[in-house]
Amino acid sequence: VNLVRMFGVIEDPQLGPALVMELCPRSLRSVLDDHQRAISWTLRLRWLAEIARGMEFLHSLLPNNILHRDLKAANVLFSSEDLNVAVAKIADFGLAVTVCTIQSTSSMAASSGAAGTLAFKAPETFDGKFTKGSDVYAYAVLIFEMATRRVPFAGLSIPEINKRVLKRFEYDEDLYQEDGIDEEKQRARWHRRNPLEARRPDLALAEQDCPSALINLSVKCCADEVTTRPRLPDISALL
């Protein structure tokens, strides 16, 4: 299973309770930031497949599945320093905050719609609606990280990121009553004025030779409507 194992809890005399977890020497974010190191697309696709399998496992647990709520490169760890054999493992289910997590991008306060990191939060999560689909949305942004080796929305202020992430279609009943413009036409017009690529991390920044299928997968995974995003079993099968 592509998850960081937790062995137990100990009581530290100075720090108090501490989790004992599997030792994983590096995060995916730190590897992507190391531009002295070339990363093949074969490796990147393998890591994405391993991450998808880990998320699929969490989502399939019974009787209660687990939603990560903060999936991103900073929360993916490697089992070895040797990246050719290292296995990507998902970590940080709201249990810990690492320096890498803090540096990856600003986190939302609890009052803004619960868990998550702003650039990775699906629009519906700002209403407190966390689903398997919201984790798939975060996976889309993680694909951006993998394809570009960049932090999403780098250089933008929190208000600017907030404006992009929160922007979504809202049906206007008055527009229908007064001008006869139904929901389908309103939605089509809104999307022409607010294309998806203007509201998501810029996939045009993907590095040379990035597979077009990977770009297309990211676009599908970050769709506005939860019901149109692919399921993790389908993503795993594709990768």
Image (cartoon, rainbow, N blue to C red):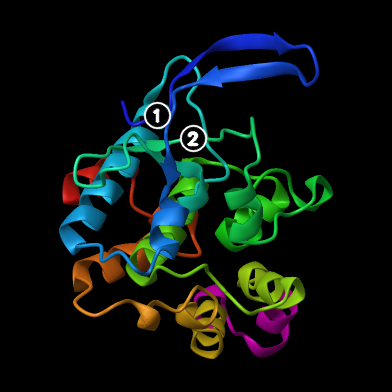
Residue 159 in the image: state x and y as whole percent.
76, 74
Residue 123 in sight in this render: no
Front in this rendered view, residue 85 or 104: 85
Q: Amino acid at mark 2?
A: Ala
Q: Amino acid at mark 1?
A: Leu
Q: Is residue 113 left or right of residue 142?
A: right
**Residue 69 falls in which quadrant of the image?**
top right
User: Is residue 15 part of the magenta span, yes or no?
Assistant: no
Vertically, is 217 above or below 74? below
Which residue sits furthest right? Answer: 111
* Secondary structure predominantly adopted by residues drawn in magenta: helix
User: Pointer 1: what residue?
Assistant: 3
Residue 229 in the image: state x and y as whole percent.
39, 55
Front in this rendered view, residue 122 or 206: 206
Q: Which residue: 29% across, 50% down? A: 48
For mark 2, give the secondary structure: loop
Q: Quadrant of the N terminus?
A: top left
Q: CA distance from mark 1 to mark 2?
A: 6 Å
Q: Is residue 27 left or right of residue 53?
A: right
Front in this rendered view, residue 91 or 17: 17
Q: Which residues are magenta?
A: 173-185
Mark 1–mark 2 contact, CB under 8 Å?
Answer: yes
Vertically, is 54 above or below 176? above
Residue 87 in the image: state x and y as whole percent.
28, 37
Mark 1 surroundings: few (<14), some (14-19) or many (≥20) residues within 10 A? many
User: Is residue 183 part of the magenta span, yes or no?
Assistant: yes
Mark 2 surroundings: few (<14), some (14-19) or many (≥20) residues within 10 A? many
Vertically, is 141 above or below 192? above
Front in this rendered view, residue 37 or 159: 37
User: Pointer 2: what residue?
Assistant: 91
